[in-house]
Structures are given as structure tokens and as C-alpha cells.
């Protein structure tokens, strides 16, 4: 699971009002190199919750992601490379996503988060 995916997931248990961002528990990480597309990064940036991305990257040990982004940074090759690496190349292969309100754990197995709810959670 990439941080791009993480940035779009939330806990949907009935009654939960603060289900985003999910905390990350890491068991296994992998890095899978991919070609950088600066235009994609500039396009996706406004759609992301940057604080959630920053905090998730920090949890994964990616400390090169700044707390805030200035518009000029989206033209900086070095910043875009770090952004690309954190967003698209680092994969959570094994671990869990944890609801910030209920502490419900959603397992991540082989890079796929299982967000299915139990019958009593719907």
C-alpha cells in the first residue's frame, strides 16, 4: 500500500466522526522504484491532506517530507523526487492501519489493506 492510498482511506465504522487519518503500524516495508512524473505530482498535491501525508511519511522513517509546502517547491526537482519517493515508491507490505477514534486495527497483507467491517460495525 502506498502513501497515496493511505491518504484517501478512512475508518467507516458507524458512528465514527474522526476516522482520518489512520495510524500506521509497520511490520514490513518495500521500496519499488518507479518513474517520476512531475506533472502528476503537481496535479495530485492539492487533493492530498498534506499533514496526514507528512505524519505518515514520518511514521515510515521518511523524514525528508516538510511539514508545509510552498508553491515554488512544486517546481524544485529535489523536492519533487522526495515527494515522489514517499508517495509512490515506498510500500507498506505488512502491518496495520488503526482508526484514531476506536483503535480498530485494519490489517495490511501483501500490500492490500483489509477495510472490511464486521456486521456490528455497519
Image: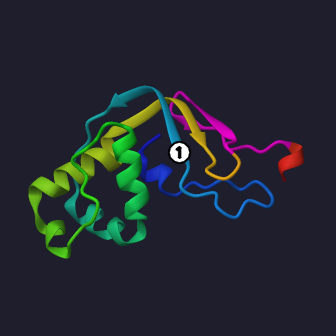
User: How many marks can you see?
Assistant: 1
Q: Residue furthest top?
A: 28
Residue 50 position in % (x across, y down):
37, 63
Write down the quadrant of residue 12 in the picture: bottom right
**x and y percentages locating residue 45 in the rendered image:** 33, 67
Residue 29 percent coordinates (x, y): 39, 28
Q: Is residue 67 above or below residue 64?
A: below
**Which residue is outermost to the left?**
77
Give the side of residue 63 with respect to residue 122, left or right: left
Q: Is residue 2 left or right of 11 when viewed as pictured?
A: left
**Residue 16 in which image quadrant:** bottom right
- Secondary structure of the residue carrying tag 1 is strand
Residue at point 73% right, 43% down?
116
Does the magenta portion include 110? yes
**For residue 97, which quarter of the picture?**
top right
Q: Residue at x 76, y 54 (%)?
A: 13
Check disc 1 and report the residue beneath it.
Answer: 23
Which coloring applies here?
Answer: rainbow
Q: Is residue 91 left or right of residue 68?
A: right
Farthest residue, direction right: 120
Query: At 34% across and 46% down in the image, what residue appears?
Result: 88
| 80 shown above or below 85 | below
Would residue 105 appear left or right of 43 to someone viewing this image? right
Residue range highlighted in magenta: 103-118
32 in magenta = no
Label 1 Cα crowd, 10 Å radius (few <14 / some 14-19 / many 20+):
some
Q: Residue at x 31, y 36 (%)?
A: 61
Q: Position of residue 72 (x, y in %)?
A: 14, 73
Amino acid at each position: 500500500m502506498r502513501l497515496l492510498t493511505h491518504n484517501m482511506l478512512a475508518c467507516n465504522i458507524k458512528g465514527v466522526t474522526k476516522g482520518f487519518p489512520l495510524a500506521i503500524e509497520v511490520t514490513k516495508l518495500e521500496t519499488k522504484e518507479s518513474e517520476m512524473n512531475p506533472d502528476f505530482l503537481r496535479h495530485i498535491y492539492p487533493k492530498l491532506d498534506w499533514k496526514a501525508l507528512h505524519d505518515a511519511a514520518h511514521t515510515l522513517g521518511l523524514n525528508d517530507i516538510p511539514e508545509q509546502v510552498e508553491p515554488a517547491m512544486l517546481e524544485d526537482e529535489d523536492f519533487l523526487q522526495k515527494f515522489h519517493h514517499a508517495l509512490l515508491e515506498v510500500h507498506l507490505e505488512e502491518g496495520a492501519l488503526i482508526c484514531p477514534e476506536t483503535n480498530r486495527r485494519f490489517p495490511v497483507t501483501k500490500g492490500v489493506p483489509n477495510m472490511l467491517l464486521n456486521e456490528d460495525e455497519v
